[in-house]
Image: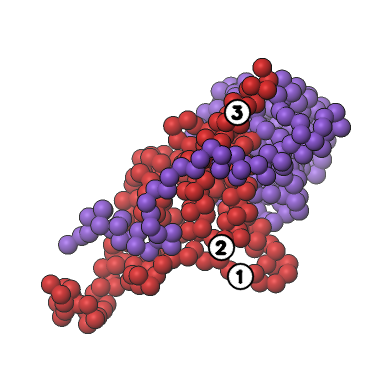
Amino acid sequence: MTESRDTERRRRVEDVVASVYDPLERYLLRRTDRGTAEDVLGDVLLVIWRRADDIPADGALPWCYAVARRCLANSLRGAQRRTRLFTRLAETPPPVEDSADPDLAEAIAALSDGDRELLRLWAWEQLPAREIAQVLDISPNAASIRLHRATGRLRAQLSSRKNRDPGGQLQGHDGTEASR
Amino acid sequence: MTEPDDELRARLSGIDPMRPTATPEPLSRQRAAEILEPTMLIDESTPDPTAGPRRRFSPALLAAAAALVIVAGILVSLSARGSGPAGANTLALSAPGGTVMSSCVRFDVAILRDMPVAFAGTATAVTPSAVTLQVDRWYTDGTADVVSIALPDSHSSASLDGVDFRQGTRYLVTATGGVVNGCGFSGEATPELEAAYAEAFPG
């Protein structure tokens, strides 16, 4: 009886891990260095195992992202402490593939942390607003509004960069792309 | 003029360091079991003089352990109420040390109801070694205005199941035996958790 319940629980956790492990690893690698990502992933697995009974059957991934978000924040705070105590460790700015689209990388960098995270969850994790809400512990309505505002601010940043650089290599005098 | 959402999203995907963003295939169960194996070893290596190193957790054992913790917590709480342990107006608690290894009981309002220490408070200071909370509501009959939660050196990011204390954020916290509970029984004051606390501690 007990053995079968343990086995059942373990199989349930294995199923969750099978579906969330890769997305979780990618989530963490998008936000920190590999060593920290591995450490935090281990912590998240432990929480998944400990709280297996609380994982929603129809929303395991956003639930796990939320755990990863909090564990990562905790871990980075710990890293800051070690940095202060010993020597400055390699800082881990969120990695961005900026060579592909420098304007966008710049525009993103000009946003607040909150806007950036919303946009990452939306575009990189490809989450709908209701799942972004689960990850950030906010209401779905608030997630929709914040996402709308964040995309608006990103567009404003992009637009201001476009206007600032009318003579750019890919742009004609009127700001349109030269190839068109 | 304005990029449609789909185009903006696609453009953002272009600077995703984890490109391509195609949804990966789920792992096999075998691979998942291998990944989980170190976690299982941590779990099963919980020091326990009455059990072997490969101890498994039964629901009955967990229930008994939870009951013991709750009873111990009640005793500590009763003794703590008489005299504030860290000053007249401050209650001192601690976060679990090291890696918390045992499995959680399922979050349940009935268990929450029996917690000897439960309050709502806003983090006014977060340092690597302690969190200070200004209490705005006691769900149990505590009186402290301020609660200090010591974070042990061995505090792991998983030890409260990922509760992330940030200055200015409001939290709902329970503790037993002077130690803050993880397992979903403490956390940021989301509407869901607040509703559970309100149900567990009516009036």
Tag 1's secondary structure? loop
Q: Earlier in the sequence, mark 1 or mark 2?
A: 2
| Chain designation of label 1 | A
Rendered view: A34 above or below B144: below
- Answer yes or no: do the residues labelled 1 and 2 have beta carbons within 8 Å? yes
How far apart marks 2 and 3 lie (CA) works out to 32 Å
Q: Which chain is purple?
A: B
**Which residue is at the far top?**
A1
Q: Which residue appears at 82% of the width and 30% of the height?
A: B51
Q: Amino acid at mark 1?
A: Ala
Q: Which residue appears at 74% of the width and 32% of the height?
A: B176
Q: Earlier in the sequence, mark 2 or mark 3?
A: 3
Q: Nearer the viewer, residue B122 or A85?
A: A85
Q: Which residue appears at 56% of the width and 23% of the height?
A: B199
Q: Which label sits on residue B185?
A: none
Quick check: do tags 1 and 2 share a chain? yes
Q: Nearer the viewer, residue A119 or A20?
A: A20
Q: Which residue is mark 2?
A: A33
- Percent of width and height locating residue A163: 24, 74
Q: Residues within 10 Å of mark 2 (few under 14, many from 20)?
A: some
Q: What is the quadrant of residue B18 in the picture? A: bottom left
Horizontal side of residue A6 vs A32, given as left or right: right
Q: Quadrant of the N terminus of chain B?
A: bottom left
Q: Which residue is mark 3?
A: A9
Q: Which residue is mark 1?
A: A90
| Chain designation of label 2 | A
Q: Earlier in the sequence, mark 1 or mark 3?
A: 3
Tag 3's secondary structure? helix
